[in-house]
């Protein structure tokens, strides 16, 4: 049974002039311990979906369940207890400017009346150390960088030891270096704590780096879902193809070029062995998904044995596009 499950979920909002549908018949399951990406353009329903998971919004139709429990069946005390299992971080951090990093982290415990002043302080310091901010506990948000603010927000979200961390565009306001640091931290927390993470983003690069599986949203519909490597390797929808293309746009002049995409070790050397053909790399990258190596490159294949090379590449599991 998935830890988080949505069954035929619809969400309508009342707006001027009538109703607006944010989600239309969404069904998906998120397994315990995985990092699950939800990606799509602005207005596709991503943020609405994540707000349904912790019941900040209620579905108009359908079921949202956590650990097999339909959230609609919970009273206020049970829902409050469930929310302790669901930490959440946002694009704009949500820190209180008048409180230090430590005080921001302990704030949720204070509101719930949990622990003594000393135990809350000790817990906060432990989590600030865990996110790499031991030396910044007494600083105010205005004294912190964007990446440091997001680390404080993560420590605050995790101080209750939730089962799930919900990330709503958590890196969108950060520079590339800070983004990389937050993504590395999410991977570490997932690995070390077994934390289930749901990542809402419009950036395929974020999904590429940290997610196990991904759902692609478009106009309120899930149009594709699967393992990240599979979605990048063989996108089944135009929207997924566009997201994959954003990671590796074609060169300005792609005449005579082919696009090679593969998951796993680099197959090019073996494919070219003992034949009269050579591969000239034009652009692209060899990178690492969470599941392992991944290649996506534009190349020119030259020589009399070009058809043999292409056949060998396809036989080894490489997707070859643009070859005649």
Image (cartoon, helix red, strand yellow):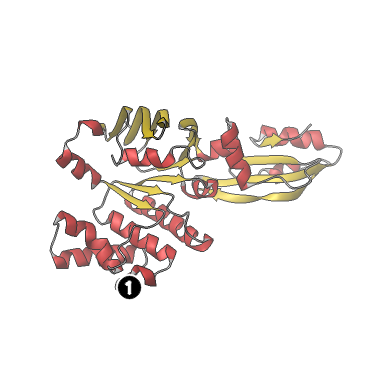
**Relative to residue 265, is residue 161 drawn left or right?**
left
The quarter in which the N terminus is drawn is: top left
Residue 176, placed above or below residue 305: below
In percent of width and height, residue 112 lies at 16, 54
Between 10 and 64, the one lying in front of the other is 10
SS for dot 1 = loop
The quarter in which the C terminus is drawn is: top right
The residue sitting at 50% across, 49% down in the picture is 206
**Relative to residue 22, is residue 78 drawn left or right?**
left
Between 75 and 243, the one lying in front of the other is 75
Label 1 sits on residue:
139
For the residue carrying disc 1, how many other residues have a C-alpha within 10 Å: few (<14), some (14-19), or many (20+)?
some
Residue 123, placed above or below residue 243: below
Residue 307, placed above or below residue 245: above
The residue sitting at 57% across, 35% down in the picture is 239
Residue 266 in view in this figure: no
């Amino acid at each position: 049974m998935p830890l988080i499950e949505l069954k035929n979920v619809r969400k309508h909002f009342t707006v001027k002039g009538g109703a607006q549908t944010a989600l239309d018949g969404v069904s998906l399951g998120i397994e315990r311990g995985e990092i699950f990406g939800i990606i799509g353009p602005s207005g596709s329903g991503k943020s609405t979906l994540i707000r349904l998971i912790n019941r900040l919004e209620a579905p108009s139709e359908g079921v949202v369940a956590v650990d097999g429990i339909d959230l609609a069946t919970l009273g206020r005390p049970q829902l409050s207890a469930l929310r302790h299992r669901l930490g959440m971080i946002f694009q704009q951090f949500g820190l209180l400017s008048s409180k230090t990093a430590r005080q921001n982290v302990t704030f949720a415990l204070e509101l719930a009346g949990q622990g003594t002043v000393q135990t809350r302080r000790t817990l906060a310091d432990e989590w600030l150390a865990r996110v790499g901010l031991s030396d910044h506990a007494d600083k105010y948000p205005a004294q912190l960088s964007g990446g440091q603010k997001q680390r404080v927000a993560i420590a605050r979200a995790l101080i209750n030891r939730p089962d799930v961390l919900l990330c709503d565009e958590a890196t969108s306001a950060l520079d590339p270096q800070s983004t990389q640091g937050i993504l590395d931290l999410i991977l570490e927390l997932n690995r070390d704590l077994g934390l289930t993470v749901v990542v809402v983003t419009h950036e395929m690069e974020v999904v590429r780096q940290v997610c196990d599986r991904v759902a692609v949203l478009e106009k309120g519909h899930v149009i594709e879902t699967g393992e990240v490597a599979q979605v990048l390797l063989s996108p089944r929808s135009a929207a997924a193809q566009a997201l994959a293309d954003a990671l590796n746009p074609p060169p300005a002049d792609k005449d005579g070029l082919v696009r090679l995409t593969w998951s796993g070790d680099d197959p090019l050397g073996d494919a070219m062995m003992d034949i009269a053909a050579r591969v000239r790399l034009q652009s692209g990258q060899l990178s690492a998904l969470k599941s392992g190596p991944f290649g996506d490159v534009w190349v020119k294949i030259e020589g009399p044995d070009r058809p043999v090379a292409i056949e060998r590449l396809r036989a080894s599991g490489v997707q070859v596009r643009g070859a005649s």
